[in-house]
Amino acid sequence: MSTQPDTPIELAVVVPAHDEADYLDDSVTDIVEGLRERDRSFAVSIIENGSTDGTPDLARSLAERYPEVDASTLPDADYGAALRHGLLETKGRFVVTFDVDYFSLEFLDRALAALEDDPMLAIVMASKRSPDADDRRPWTRRAVTATFSTLLRVGFGLRVSDTHGMKALRRSAVVPLAQACASGEDLFDTELIIRAERAGLGVTALGVAVEERRPSRTPVISRVPPHAHRSGPSAPPSGWAETKSGRIRYFLKAKTTTNPGSP
């Protein structure tokens, strides 16, 4: 199995993988072959997490096939934990996060160019909500994205138009924020973006074309912070929320904070 080099590389691509035996081989092959056509040193990290199919073996096989690929395994199925692990363990100057069923080398090129042109920029999101986006998903998914984005903008002051999906990051700027993040599953990247904005880091979004390769496997409710505005005796304690996996640390506390980097 290949391992990431000790010396920094220019680009690290993090790919979480849970029960992705049907898609992982084709996706990683497309990513590796596409990146080989670009003039950048790179590594691809597959972060397998809690799979019950052949994904772990397939990830190891891909790491043996491609010298640029590394495979790690986490015991539990947790998308956010996989993203966090990949971001903290990679050696790249820039880090791009792809999903097995949602990636774009065209976005990667545009996002890296933006990061290189503006040293104050820390995160470039692939937005499904910006004016130049082309969101071809079913209307139900588009409605959920719009609702979630509105909740974050109105309730928590989020300025960027999207938080889920592909993103390019300046690793040196975001690692301290990722280390501080308390959320896992589908809230990790939302917490990371909010922390970045509150810390005064540059965050922007590029519109992308979005077309699902398969129906979403993530329940809609897991992407919306539950009980965010509930009050009264039934409200959860301050700083906490309930999710399908039980209570987790709830980071979306208020618009104002004494430390911008600490939601």
Image (tube, rainbow, N blue to C red):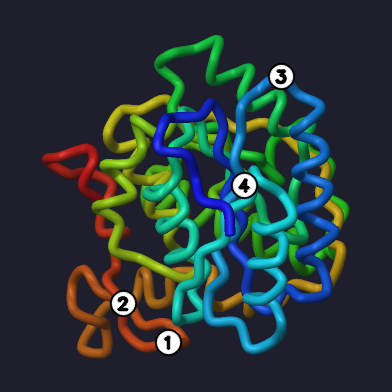
Splitting the image into 4 quarters, where does residue 137 fall? bottom right
Count up the numbered dots.
4
Under circle 3, the secondary element is loop
Mark 4 and mark 1: Cα distance apart in space:
29 Å
Q: Which mark is residue 248?
A: 2
**Amino acid at circle 3:** Asp
Q: Position of residue 158 (x, y in %)?
A: 43, 43
Mark 4 and mark 3: Cα distance apart in space:
15 Å
* Residue at the spot 70% in from the left edge and 86% down from the top edge: 53
Residue 98 visible in the current orientation? yes
**Disc nearest the viewer among 4 and 1:** 4
Q: Position of residue 124 (x, y in %)?
A: 56, 32
**Amino acid at circle 2:** Ile
Residue 161 visible in the current orientation? no
**Amino acid at circle 1:** Ser
N-terminal of the pair, mark 3 or mark 2, is 3
Classify 10 Å Cα crowding around label 3: few (below 14), some (14-19), many (20 and above). Answer: few
Q: Is residue 240 left or right of residue 91?
A: left
Q: Which mark is residue 39?
A: 3
Q: Which mark is residue 245?
A: 1
* Residue at the spot 29% in from the left edge and 68% down from the top edge: 250
State the residue position of label 4.
44
Q: Position of residue 248 (x, y in %)?
A: 31, 77
Please identify the residue farthest to the top as the structure is shown: 117
Under circle 4, the secondary element is strand
Q: Nearer the viewer, residue 233 or 85?
A: 85
